[in-house]
């Protein structure tokens, strides 16, 4: 089967073809560590909380005890809040060796608590997916569009024909920027101002390279 394509640019390639040696490959897909899992949502999951389980270490991607399956139809919608800002470079979607494997993925950035109604809008990028049973195919994002992402929504819009969709692993590659808060005092010239009443948080970015 030929490699898939993304509409409007991008594409997929084998993770094994990447420059880093195999022992470093798992580090490249370490963005799962930067997800706020307590706030992560997966809409239309058949078992509550199962959507969180597919964001796991690359080395554990073949653990088929953790997966998410859709409920009412073939669609799934992941709302993924990060703990900082992310420059997203690539995504892996691993499924089952049957028609329940996702066949299309649509990405939306910075729309917290997105619903299925919101998927009517134009996505930031759409991918046609190939069956990936080993977690080796990476779909490259348009980095210019995904260079400042604090929330990512992944809409699995269709599969290869089954009634439900099953996903075992979602890997994300990119850079993460920490948001550190420091208290600072703002100068204020109003009469009898109390500086303690005018403290705000200043955000200082620090970049950590995941790949």
Image (spheres, rainbow, N blue to C red):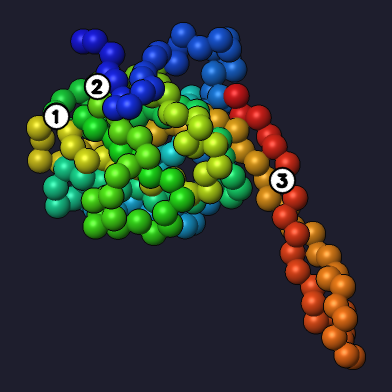
Please report the residue visible at 42 percent of the width from the left and 24 percent of the height from the top.
Answer: 140
Q: Which residue is mark 3?
A: 205
Q: Are marks 3 and 2 in contact (CB under 8 Å)?
A: no
Q: Which mark is residue 151?
A: none
60 or 2: nearer the eye?
Answer: 2
Circle 2 crowding by C-alpha within 10 Å: few under 14, some 14–19, many from 20:
many
Q: Which of the two labelled residues, at mark 3 and mark 2, occupies the earlier sequence position?
A: 2
Q: Quadrant of the N terminus?
A: top left
Establish if 10 lies above or below 204. Answer: above
Q: Are marks 2 and 1 in contact (CB under 8 Å)?
A: yes
Q: Position of residue 21 (x, y in %)?
A: 57, 10
Q: Position of residue 150 (x, y in %)?
A: 53, 48
Q: Which mark is residue 131?
A: 2
Q: Which mark is residue 160?
A: 1
Circle 3 crowding by C-alpha within 10 Å: few under 14, some 14–19, many from 20:
some
145 or 98: nearer the eye?
Answer: 145
């Amino acid at each position: 089967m030929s490699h898939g394509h993304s509409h409007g640019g991008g594409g997929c390639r084998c993770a094994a073809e990447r420059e880093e040696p195999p022992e470093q490959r798992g580090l490249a897909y370490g963005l799962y560590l930067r997800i706020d899992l307590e706030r992560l949502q997966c809409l239309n999951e058949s078992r509550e909380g199962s959507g969180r389980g597919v964001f796991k270490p690359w080395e554990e991607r073949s653990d088929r005890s953790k997966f998410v399956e859709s409920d009412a139809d073939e669609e799934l919608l992941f709302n993924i809040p990060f703990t900082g800002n992310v420059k997203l470079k690539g995504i892996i979607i691993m499924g089952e060796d049957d028609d329940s494997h996702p066949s299309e993925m649509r990405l939306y950035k910075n729309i917290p608590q997105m619903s299925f109604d919101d998927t009517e809008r134009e996505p930031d990028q759409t991918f046609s997916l190939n069956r990936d049973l080993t977690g080796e195919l990476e779909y490259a994002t348009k980095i210019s569009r995904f260079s400042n992402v604090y929330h990512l929504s992944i809409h699995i819009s269709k599969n290869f024909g089954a009634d439900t969709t099953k996903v075992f692993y979602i890997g994300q590659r990119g850079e993460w920027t920490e948001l550190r808060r420091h208290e600072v005092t703002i100068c204020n010239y109003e009469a009898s101002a109390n500086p303690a009443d005018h403290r705000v948080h200043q955000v200082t970015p620090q970049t950590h390279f995941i790949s």
